[in-house]
Amino acid sequence: MKNYEKKSFIQIFLGYFVSVAMFILLLGYLYFQQQQTFLMQKIAMNMHQYLMKLKQSQFKYKQDGFSYEATFNSKLKKQLPQKDGDIYYKAFSKRHIIKIDASIVDNELKKIKYFTIILQILLISFFAFISFILARKSLKPMADTISHLDRFMKDLIHDLNTPITSILINSKMLKKDAIEKDIKKITRIENSAKNISSLYANLEILLDGNSLKKENIDLTILINDIVEIYKSIYPNIKFNVDIKGDNVNINLNAIKRILDNIISNACKYSIDINPTIEISYNNDILIIKDNGKGIKYPKKIFERSYKEVDSGHGIGMHIVHRLCSELSISIDIKSEPNQGTIVTLKFN
């Protein structure tokens, strides 16, 4: 199950479960209050029966846990038994107060309380299982549709690879025999094909989210290899690489796409004078910093199709964000126009 499927499942499950659990807890509370009232009414009846027997025996009758007190307080009202220390008492008139040992009532209340709690636990457990089943069933149509679309996209992307490769090969062959004025046109075709090839690579790794198996990767070698490629493409850019740390447990193809997209953007939007890209890694934190044109709205950079210039597809950083989410990598971007951009990746 992919991360976005897990999040959807958790949201649906919690939606069912929390609402039902709160309802069960409320019903349990009301049930306990009702049973407590019934118990007090029962105790009041027992007290009344005790008082009747007292009167019949000329106040000589004795019963364990019960006691009698004569009073002449006219303010006493008839009510349910009330607790006072280690006794419950009830006034039956301004002359008679019956008392009962509090342990007798409290023991009955404990039984009701324990029964209510056990009943609530059983009901909540049962509805947790029901919520799990409902959440799975609710996700199934969406999962089937996404699976169908993924298969379609994989087939489509696979078919795109052949013509892209053919365009790149033939453009290189045409360059050899082309005159100077045609080389620029061929270069534009070649660059467009490379853009499509990069988009193809991004989509391919993104659609392969179910098989993002992790392995120990030497980040020093990987970053240096990527930097060497971009040094050949952008010879005017200065790269400062400072990598300190052990191997990273991560999917190789996914981290390649993440780093390639970030470094590619840093290169494409570098300033014309003294362009510099600094890459550092220490304590599971990778920082890629440039002194380029910067981003006007860095919070929007992960939105699909968002771009601040006409070039590009506006999907690269969206895919970076998706891959980081799949790999549990925290990503943060700080940028200001004409001040450069800092991308921070934290490997959890």
Image (tube, rainbow, N blue to C red):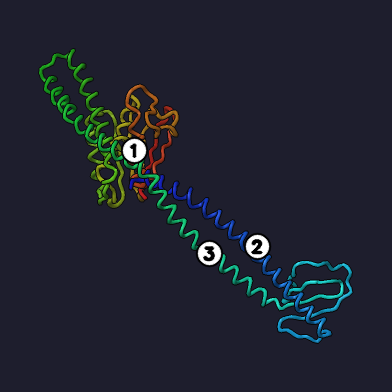
Looking at the rendered structure, the secondary structure element under dot 1 is: helix
Mark closer to the observer (1, 3): 3
Q: Position of residue 187 (x, y in %)?
A: 20, 20
Are dots 3 and 2 in contact, CB under 8 Å? no
Inspect the image, locate mark 2, and give the three-letter code of the amino acid beneath it: Gln
Q: Where is residue 291 in the image (x, y as percent from the top left)?
A: 37, 31
Residue 172 appears left or right of 26: left
| Residue shown at the point (62%, 59%) measured from the top left | 30
Inspect the image, locate mark 1, and give the three-letter code of the amino acid beneath it: Val
Q: In which quarter of the image is residue 159?
A: top left
Inspect the image, locate mark 3, and give the three-letter code of the amino acid beneath it: Leu
The label shown at residue 34 is 2
Residue wearing tag 3: 119
The label shown at residue 67 is none
Q: Quadrant of residue 154?
A: top left
Mark closer to the chain start, 1 or 3: 3
Q: Where is residue 63 in the image (x, y as percent from the top left)?
A: 73, 84
Q: Quadrant of residue 114?
A: bottom right
Are dots 2 and 1 in contact, CB under 8 Å? no
Residue wearing tag 1: 320
